[in-house]
Amino acid sequence: MLSAVIKPALDLCRDGIAAWKKRRNPARAQAQRLLDAFAAHGVAGVQIPRLLPEALALPNADFADPDELRTKLTPRLLDWAADTLALRRGWLDGVDSERHHRVQGYKHPSIYRDWLRQRQELFPDVDRIIHVFVASKEPLGPQSTGSLCVAYGERFDTLDTQELSRYWLLSDHWRLDHSPCTVNLMALCAIATDLGIMVIGHVATREALVRLDDGQLFVPQVLALDTHRWFPADLIDTPPGQDSAWRQTLWADAQELLRSGHALGPNRSA
């Protein structure tokens, strides 16, 4: 009688341990990250084969779940996934905490200008948008606090009627209560205007912006949380009757930053 009770319990324990080991398999973790990344960008697992180049063709069933996919993973497939979604390859491998690449142009706006021009030259006919995320609907001003996250998105393909985009981060833990971050945003808006790139403002939760900055969310996941749209370009071309001394001071700093191409002196925004 006792053995009849113990054996099922032991079998259940063994099954649990086997499932735990299976889930900790690094190849399975790679497969799960790949599937999660495409899902976050609007592509279901079974749709991924429609985007694959012919040399990497695999049947739909291989993308049905991570256990099926892990045995089909190759460095070429992971490279393709990272390139297609503009992800850091190390993140797919589980050795990098950052999901998106960052373009580091803080206080050096010429880096943004050169990089954006390069993207336009490489892919001249795609839609592209710069997204600016804050956590409050209130207009930006000297009282503003919290995260300021900036991302660039460009369309890379279409599935049926759905446009698919990939994203890069253009900010790195910027904050609204540190005025040089707003100055850099203004400079970036001016560059985008010159290059004909739309800039759209979004409002998301503080938690989501912190997690985006810390590499725990994808940009499209934060876009899905958008509760309000605003217009960052108003910072450089203010609507009548809405200007302020605060904006004028920061815009003067942004214009000097654009002219000099490097950080401002110690007596200006730092």
Image (spheres, helix red, strand yellow):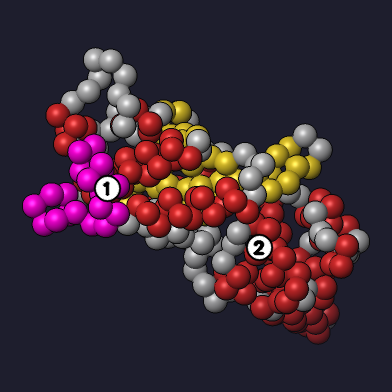
Q: Residue 25, image x and y in percent?
A: 69, 78
Q: Which residues are magenta?
A: 250-270
Q: Which mark is residue 259?
A: 1
Residue 255, magenta (yes or no) = yes
Above or below, comparing residue 214 to residue 187 in the picture? below
Please tell me how crowded label 2 is: few (under 14), some (14-19), or many (20+) other residues with Cα within 10 Å: few
- Give 14 or 101, whichever is nearer the viewer: 101
Above or below, comparing residue 64 to residue 221 in the picture? below
Q: Which mark is residue 83?
A: 2
What number of labels is visible? 2
Task: Identify the residue at horizontal 81%, vertical 59% (top origin).
Answer: 52
Task: Identify the residue at horizontal 14%, vertical 29% (top origin).
Answer: 245
Tell me the element at label 2. helix
Kind of residue sitting beneath label 2 = Asp
Distance in Å between CA atoms under marks 1 and 2: 34 Å
Nearer the camera: disc 1 or disc 2: 1
Tell me the element at label 1. helix
Residue 196, magenta (yes or no) = no
Q: Residue 259, image x and y in percent?
A: 27, 47
